Image: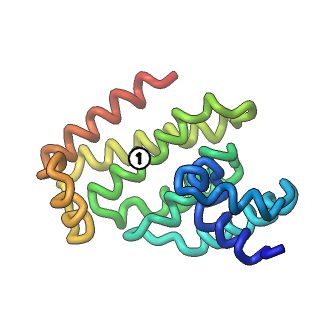
Amino acid sequence: MNWDRAKELYFMYWGNEFFMWKDGDLEEYKSYSISKDQEIVWRGELSEKLYSELEVKHNSSLNGLIGIINYFGEYDLLKKVLYFISNNYKCADSFLKLRYAEELFDIMEKIKFHEYVPKEALKETKELIEIIINYILSNKIEIRAESEKILEFNQDMPNENYIILRTQELLKRVEAFY
């Protein structure tokens, strides 16, 4: 058995079999017959690895952690993500702050797919989203070079006004969420 390759696939797709399937790698992964217990161990290792790699500017690790939370319902991991974002969002530019808030809202929207959701974590998530939104709306919009590249790539996001409108729309969605 090629455990190294199986683990590589597991880490590459953040344990998400849907994405393995979408890219045509699920059959190979399944051929290794990895037990659910082993996957839980790997998920823990992957979560720790991603958490240790979190940075304000580059958020692929954050995307991975949020993917794990959404796919597996790992709400203990949500506390770590909330801690990171609450301690670092002020260092981010306005676009990245908005992305943090949107990613957190995505977690809130996906809770309906999980049986157990700690109400306190959901409340903390909603509160942090509202804090970030209010921070964006009450301060001058700042767009750094990294975000400018993203904004230039997508013509739908041409300027500061778009960020404000998108933030206001998110606020409406958050307020409408129970």
| Lateral position of residue 30 relative to residue 131, left or right | right
Q: Position of residue 81 (x, y in %)?
A: 57, 56
Residue that mark 1 sits on:
101
Task: Assign the N terminus to one quadrant of the image.
Answer: bottom right
Residue sitting at x 20%, y 38%: 165
Image x and y of residue 120, in percent: 66, 37
Tell me which residue sits at (45%, 47%) in the image: 103
Residue 118 locus on image (x, y percent): 70, 37
Horizontal side of 60 relative to 153 (left or right) equals: right
Tag 1: amino acid: Ala
Is residue 98 placed above or below 64 in the rendered structure? above
Up/down of 135 relative to 51, above or below: above
Q: Please name the colour scheme applied to the rendered image.
A: rainbow
Number of numbered discs visible in the structure rendering: 1
Residue 62: where, in percent of width, then height?
Answer: 51, 61
Q: Quadrant of residue 144?
A: bottom left
Which residue is depicted at the point 48% across and 40% down? 106
The front one of 157 and 128 is 157
Disc 1 secondary structure class: helix
- At label 1, counting other C-alpha atoms closer than 10 Å, the crowd grade (few under 14, some 14-19, many 20 or more) is many
